Amino acid sequence: MSDHGTTVREYDLFTPEAIADPNGFLHSVRAESPLSWLPQLDAYLLTRYADINAALRNRRMDSANMARALQRLTPAEQEELAPVRRSIEMWMGHTVPADHVRFQQLLKRYFTPAMIDRLRPRVRAFTHELLDAVTPKGQMEVVRDLAYPLPANVIAELLGMPVSDREQLQAWSRDILPIFGNGDLQQLRQAQRSMLEMHDYLRLIAAERRREPREDVLSTFVAAEAEGILTEDEAVANCVLLLFAGHETTANLIANGLVLLFDNPGELARLRDDPSLTPLAVEEMLRCDGPAGVIGRVTTADTEVAGHAVPAGKHLYLALMAANRDPDVFGAPDVFDITRERNRHLSFGMGTYYCLGAALARMETDECLRILLDRCPDLRPAYQTPDWLPTAPIGHRLASLPVTF
Ligand code: HEM
């Protein structure tokens, strides 16, 4: 395929080379082909910062439904899993634009700077509590002991769940995730059971909040329900969205960020010497190894992408991780520099669907890193090579991260 002088080359994201070194692979794609075609995924791929930035602002594209695993099922299986599909269709970003604006305006009532200030001492307390449990041992597995439970606790707090139910939330989160990856039928059935269980649970809390409102998301939702702005089904569905959007993402940022520090001992030493650099370090972690490495779009009308005409109804993957290492925008893009200036990474997206939890994720990671480095001055990796697992369609996350201190 050729248009405007460049060729739309085909790539395979599932080769051993692409899986072993996703950033190296995407560097070659970016240099060779502004718009690429992924035959196995029946989708285009964008890798350049300028093209991705334009796509994120392109009104002829919508956020694509991420429940990929559900789309591969037989008609009978799809019928069986219709409740989970219908619920995900109510998530903001998966809805028609008018509903998206309605949910966005509603959640902006809750996601305010005052909410961040209110949650900050809770995040500190959660981090200390999790570290208290492991410090006597002088070792921990960061993903299991800190990175995964911390944001789950924050979301539990945000939803207004009692402390005793926090672990249940982590279990639901773990069960629901295969819907967005390569889950098999058995995993999808479990995901549906857990999602429906979580809905029932949230309905009970919503009923309590109707009687006695508090400062949590469900109270915001039930107040909006009383104003006729949304239904209870939409409220509980969007609570699950918050769990999906805010749990693994933040967990992966904390864990991936630590690996970047261990890989760059000079930067770790600078951060220890001057903890006021933590916010900049978090931005550089987001740029170098942000958790939402690739996001999906679908064209809603004929449009131009990277100089090529793309018809309506086509799927595109925007590789934010490739944009964040584009040498046209970032000097020495593969260098992890915690004092990098003008770090305009795209890890929280841009435009219409910009991450509502960006400030929250930044605050959680900032507090967690400060407390961890302060309490564990001797923190060291206890692995030979990081325990990366490939993520779909390209990228990685840590299965575990053992450390000693
Ligand atoms: C490091 C952590 C996080 C990263 C990297 C991240 C990344 C993203 C990205 C890239 C998008 C845009 C998706 C698109 O354009 O299709 C997004 C949207 C969103 N994020 Fe986050 N996110 C993080 C944490 C959170 C947290 C903690 C929450 C809330 C608890 C949250 C809530 C949301 C919501 C509600 C949306 C949808 C916004 C909309 O459709 O208008 N995220 N996030």
Image (tube, rainbow, N blue to C red):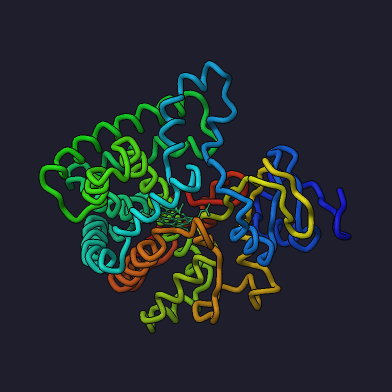
Front residue of 39/112: it is 112
Residue at (65, 78) in percent of width and height: 331
Q: Residue furthest front?
A: 228
Residue at (30, 34) in percent of width and height: 199
Front residue of 191/99: it is 99
Q: Is residue 147 visible?
A: yes
Residue at (31, 45) in percent of width and height: 229
- In percent of width and height, residue 403 lies at 39, 59
Residue 280, picture quadrant: bottom left
- In percent of width and height, residue 380 lies at 41, 66
Q: Which quadrant of the figure contains the C terminus?
A: bottom left
Residue 57, picture quadrant: bottom right
Question: Horizontal placement of 250 versus 344: left or right?
Answer: left
Question: Horizontal placement of 319 versus 104: left or right?
Answer: right
Q: Ligand 1 quadrant?
A: bottom left
- In percent of width and height, residue 48 lies at 69, 63
Q: Residue furthest top?
A: 76
- In percent of width and height, residue 218 lies at 24, 47
